[in-house]
Structure formats: C-alpha cells, structure tokens
Image (cartoon, helix red, strand yellow):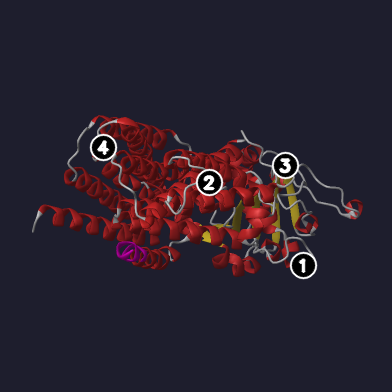
Amino acid sequence: MNFSMAVEISYLVASVLFVVGLKRLQSPATARGGNQLAALAMLIAIVATLLDNQIIDWTAILIGMFTGTFIGFWAAKKVQMTQMPELVGIFNGFGGAASALVAGAELLRLQSLNIDSTQGEGLSIVISCLIGTVTFSGSFVAFGKLKGIVSGNPITFPLQKTLNAILFIGLLFLGGSIMGMYTFADLPTLTTFFIFTIAALSLGILLVLPIGGADMPVVISLLNSYSGLAASAAGFVIGSNVLIISGALVGASGLILTLIMCKAMNRSLSNVAFGAFGGESTGSPQGNDDSDKIARSVDPEGAAMILAYAQSVVIVPGYGLAVAQAQHELRKVVDNLEERGVDVKYAIHPVAGRMPGHMNVLLAEADVPYDKLFDLDEINDDFSRTDVVLVVGANDVVNPEAHNPQSVIAGMPILDVDKAKSVIIMKRSLSTGFAGIDNPLFYMDHTSMLFGDAKDSMNDLVREVREA
Amino acid sequence: MGEMLVGIYVFVLATLAGREVITKVPPTLHTPLMSGANAISGISIVGALVVSAQVDSGLAQWLGGLAIALAMVNVVGGFMVTDRMLEMFKKR
C-alpha cells in the first residue's frame, strides 16, 4: 500500500467517523462521545492533509492554524449559553467564508499558472464562492439582529425583490463569464470574480435584512445548512470526497432543523424568507372587547400554595425565562416542589428559545436533568391529567387561538396547557407575543396571572413554596 | 465531467445518509447538533490546506491562510462548545 492510498483511506475513515459521531447524537447518553468522535475524525483529516501535500511554504498555514485555534478556543470558553445563537450564527459565517476563500485561492492559483479551468472546475468555483459568500454576509446580518445591532424588525424598502432578482441574474451572468463560457466586456477573469463576490455579499445582506427577529431560529438553521453546502462545493473545487460528504451531512442537518422550525411556527420556508413578518412586539394592541375580559392576578404566596398542594406540575418555559436569566431560580422552585413529593415535568416547545433546542441547553446548564424535558408531541396528551401548569415567559406557544380556524396563528402547533386543572402564567404584562394577537388563555377562569419580572417572581416563589 | 458526476453521486448519497441519521436526533439535542455540524463544516480546512500547500507567494497564499484561520475557528470553537454543552446534559 503506497502513501497516497493511506491518505485516501484516512479520508474514508474520517467520513465514516463523522456519520457515526452524528449517529451518537441520537441519545444524550452517547452524544458527548459522538462529538468527540467527530472531532477525532477532523484531526485525522487535517493530519492526513498536512502529510500528503508537499508544502512549499508553511508561513501562512501555521499563522492561520494558530490564529484560528486561539480564537475558536477563546470563543468556546467565553460564550454564555444564552448567546449560543449568536455564536453559531457567526461560526456559520466563518465556515461559509472559508469555503468561498478556498474557491478564490484556487482560481488565483490556476490563473497564476496560466491554466484555464475546465467548465466543471469553473462551475464548482462559482457555486462555492456564491454559497459561501451569501452565508458569510447573511450570517453577519443575522448575528447583528440577534445582538440588537441591526433592528430586529423586518427591514424592507421599495423594489427590494426586484433588486434581489437583478442581483441574482447578474450573478448568473458573471458566473458564466468566470467559467469561461464567454467574456464579459473584456474584463479579466479575476476582475469579474471580484465583482461577482461583491454582488454575492450584497445578496446575502439583502436576503436576511427583511426577515424579522422572531424568525431568526429558521434563518440560523438555514445558514447552517448553507455553510455545509458551501463546504461541499469547495470539495468539488479541489476534488475531495471528504469535503463533499461532510458538507452534505451538515447541509442535510441544517435543512432538517430549518423544516422543523418552520413547522413549529406554522410557516412555510418561502413565507419566512419573503414574508417580512415577525418583528419585536410593541405592547398590546387595542382589541375591541378588552373591557369585558378580566384577567385574575395572583401574588407569589397564592401561586406557591397552588403549586405546593398539587400532585403534578408541568412547567412551560419560554424565551422570557432566558431573557430574565431565571433558569437557576426556576430549578430551585422545582427542587422544593419535588421535596414535597410533587411530580414535576418540563414541556418544551420547539421555538421556546432563539435556536432549535436552545431552551433545553439553558435548562441543562441549570442542572435540570434531560429526562424531565418533554417535547410537544410527548406531553400534549398529559395536560388533561395535570393539576397545575406554570407558564414562564411564554405566550404564543400556549395560545389556544391556534385551534381557531379564523385566527392568524390557526394551525400553529401549541402546548395545550388550557386543558390542565389550573394554569399560572408568569409574565410582565398582558402584552401580546410575536404574533401580535391577544391570548384568551389569560382570561380563562382557571388561569391566574403572576405579574412581574421572571427572576424576582421566581425568587419570591422559592421562598413561598418553602414556607407553604 | 466524469469526476464531477462521481462527486454528485457521493453528495446525494451522503445527503440521504445524513437525513436518516439526523432525523432521529431528539429535539433536546438540536442546539449541540447544530454547533457540532458547524464544526464539521469546518472540514473546508482540508480544502484550504490543499490550496495553500501548492502556492508559495502572493495573494493566493494569504487568502488560503485566511481560509485556514476561519475554518480552524469553526473546528476548534465548534467541537469545544458542543462538548461544553453536552457535558451539562445529565440524567437525574
């Protein structure tokens, strides 16, 4: 067996380990090992590549590897779990940029050697640069929206879709020129490639700007998928199967998560992309019949009584809980309830956090065991047998209006908490959620509202439950 | 075109394998799945290394170096933060 054969086999082993590693993510018990297996696969691939290539000059390679390792290490250590969407968003962008740069560097290399790329190579370079660049600029807009640097409201302007269409046609045209199908205004290929990259950057920005802050979980998932596709395309550029395979795995993963998120929000992908829906809510809109609806409020002491003398309690955490950073206080309340023999479970809606599975991570950080977390399908039938549901900082995901065919959120999968014997809702005010509609659950006879900041109310609850 | 066609075969089959594996990942692990997948998309480091190895000067070298740095952030940061999260998932 010669050396290059050994390198090829290393790549095959790495590809297999990526699939096996992802497979181990099917259970929380094996997931950590699975991730480590995937990291080992990456190490194998990198070492094989370094050994296989006659490296002419190590300078740029070493500087790149050290800088990247340092920044990655620092980011992974420093990031708070609430900031995971931002981190994943920016990493998506880096992955996309890396793939686009591979395409650019390869084109430069071929040009400097005066080699004309074949149309197949040219096509790979164009696609890799396009997807990678769109991922890069789109991810940075998404990051800005999550951080609040860019407005979370959909940003729209006249003729936006027309502009996008023109950009897209322009990109196709320039792409054809880079592939050498024709020459465009006698520009050298590299100049055309430069214009192409600028156009792709603009397209990425324009595609994400009109999408509202509430839809960011979908956008992050989709950009995750793109970063994988960009890596696959880079695999076509350099003719490497390990890149094609790994990129395809990531592409599939991101797309599956995107579709899960869309389903949870009852929206189609095209509606998210072009709907310009889902800005931050701004207080309660004035309904016509607000006057005759009375929400019953309860103080922490009363809420503690209801909880402490229940047999079964289901907690429904929403993003408001994460914003108030009250996960740890919530767990203390639950600990106290469990000491009293109350059966407590958590019901997690797919869009409870800012990215798929975000709430589960936040609760895991607060030492909530994962076998107490239940998703929508697992727990919805249990609500009718539940004594008390405690909703913390969630709104649209428990709105029974979703069952009303006339409502704007008709058909959205919700947690049927109104079926429980009694419901306590911990919330700042009666304001609406992202969907901007009133929630009849607040006015039901068996509902009590515990108004206030989630963290303060939780602290009060910890004390009151202990004394109850 | 032959090589490209083989590449497309590989891509399609890997996508199908990915779909089979990832559909069964429970919602509780969707965030680690995404950050782990993110780290895997850092595989473009291999592409960046291959291109960088073949050049010894000029812009191509520095573009390659930048690609290596960005992909490495993905690889190191992605796997480490995923590990940090998965460490927190405990049974009662």
How many angstroms separate mark 3 from mark 2 (CA)? 20 Å
Q: Chain of mark 3?
A: A
Q: Chain of mark 4?
A: B
Residue B32 located within the stretch drawn in magenta: no
- Magenta span of residues: B1-8
What mark, if any, has residue B55 been given in the picture?
A: 4
How many angstroms separate mark 1 from mark 3 (CA)? 26 Å
Q: Chain of mark 2?
A: A
Quarter that holds the N terminus of chain A: bottom left
How many angstroms separate mark 3 from mark 4 (CA)? 60 Å
- Labelled pair 3, 2 in contact (Cβ < 8 Å): no
Q: Which residue is mark 3?
A: A428
- Labelled pair 4, 1 in contact (Cβ < 8 Å): no
**Badge 1 amino acid:** Asn
The reply to the same-chain question for discs 2 and 4 is no
Q: Residue B21 appears at what percent x and percent y?
A: 39, 65
Q: Which residue is mark 1?
A: A404
